[in-house]
Image (cartoon, rainbow, N blue to C red):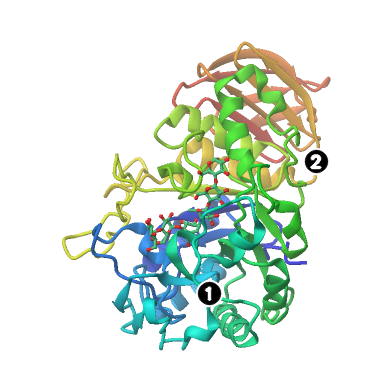
Amino acid sequence: QYTDPHCGGKQVIVHLFEWKWTDIALECERFLSKKGFCGVQVSPANEHVMVTSPPRPWWERYQPVSYKLQSRSGTEAEFADMVSRCKAVGVRIYVDVILNHMAGLGRNGTGTAGSTFNSDLFDFPGVPYIKEHFNEVCPLNSYNDAHTIKDCYLVGLTDLDQNISYVRDKIAAFLNTLIDYGVAGFRVDAAKHMWTKDIAAIQQNVKDLPEGGRPFFYHEVIDQSNGPVTTQQYTSLGYVTEFRYCQKIKEGIEGFDRLGGVVDYGWGMTDSDHAFVFVDNHDNQRGHGGGGAIITFEKPINYRLAVAFTLANDYGFTRVMSSYYFGENSDLGPPHDINFLTKDVPFNADESCGNEWVCEHRWASIANMVAFRNAVVGTQKQNYFNKNNQIAFSRGNKGFFAMSRSGHMDETLQTGLPAGQYRDLINGRMVTVGSDGTARIQIDNPQEPVLAIIIGSDS
Ligand code: AAO
């Protein structure tokens, strides 16, 4: 329950962080559908505060003013158009929803849809919410106590009381509106800070998708095996973010010959059927919510190796990050003009992105691994090879993957595949698998140091 993403068995979501709805619709049609992406995680779609100091940071979208669908990414009409155009080409939309809180204490004014609000008075007429719908004010000053984590004010954000049926109903109505537009599921922001019984009650009030089935839910719970709130407490509610993986993959990539143990479950990591897995996210790539031990686009070769391995591997449900450049300014909002209107995502001749958008999801070692993961779903890792900063393995008799830190590799390896000719999905070289299943595996591209072949990739 709540674990089916409703995308025809496809396996990879991309987070188009801060993209406008109009650009996402185009990206579904021109790229994501062709590469086999399951769907897109979109930035929060509902009305939010507009922060002036610092000037229009990305994080203003995590301070809701109402559930009206007008945000920095676009209007309600543009949202509706995006959802249906993506769905028409088999790409689903998953909305980042903020159910834990409204805007931060000390903030007031007008939101992106024109609603007034005053956090210190707990007045959000656009919903409406009033004081009785919030928990008593207390600082979230300890991560050792579940009551403090769940009932106090995360970085001063006005904390809704989801035990109140009125609050549950308003939240469920918001989610149901999104479902009516055709979204397939939700990333639940700050789920760690809500009681699971309240989330369960809200999810029960959410309708089935129009095509049938329960919506997909994945919950943001940062569990580093050092607090009372664990990912396992949430697995009955859908998938749960597995932040330990971000650290594991970094250690594995930097100590290549240890990568075999990248997912050892040794830290109580979430079971594969509920682990929501990613190399970095919009917080930790810029030092929010667990920065530091993370690989990001700033180290492009290591990043390609990390994401390619993650997509080749057999652990969890995967999300690929797609970012914009921010340099040293971790508050910096998306690329914008002088009026803070978000810029379009233009494309260069080589399909890379302009206007300061990074577009990791278009890098060959990442984009072309989506087809690999889709093709090998349900198979085991076998024929593991790990030597001289090179790694390779097969996935049942469906696919074979190899990567090399140096970008060069020339080894004869067991692929587990039937004899035949296969075309490398990344660099295009033909690979000949003999009747004994072995093949000469060659990589010769330090920029895209990955090789992947799948059943049916021979044309
Ligand atoms: C902004 C301003 C604040 C201001 C506030 C209200 O920055 O100064 O007080 O407005 O006016 C985002 C930004 C925030 C921003 C907020 C609202 O990141 O800076 O605040 O929007 O605009 C915790 C939560 C987790 C959360 C994460 C950032 O558990 O849910 O903090 N992530 C989500 C979103 C995020 C968003 C929000 C939630 C709020 O993805 O973008 O915030 O909607 C420990 C805990 C974690 C905790 C981290 C960070 O983690 O375990 O639960 O995450 O600390 O506080 C090691 C440890 C690990 C530790 C980690 C980080 O890895 O092992 O346990 O380091 O220290």
User: Disc 1 beta carbon < 8 A from ligand 1?
Assistant: no
Disc assigned to residue 379: 2
Residue 126 drawn at (x, y percent) = 41, 87
Q: Residue furthest left?
A: 338
Closer to viewer: mark 1 or mark 2? 1
Tag 1: amino acid = Glu
Res 122 quadrant in image:
bottom left
Residue 314 drawn at (x, y percent) = 73, 40
Residue, x 59% and y 76% (percent of image)?
161
Tag 2: amino acid = Thr
Neighbor class of circle 2 (other Cα within 10 Å; few <14, some 14-19, many 20+) is some
Disc assigned to residue 136: 1
**Secondary structure under badge 1?**
loop
Residue 392 drawn at (x, y percent) = 68, 23
Residue, x 69% and y 36% (percent of image)?
313
- Depth order, front residue of 327/30: 327
Res 188 quadrant in image:
bottom right
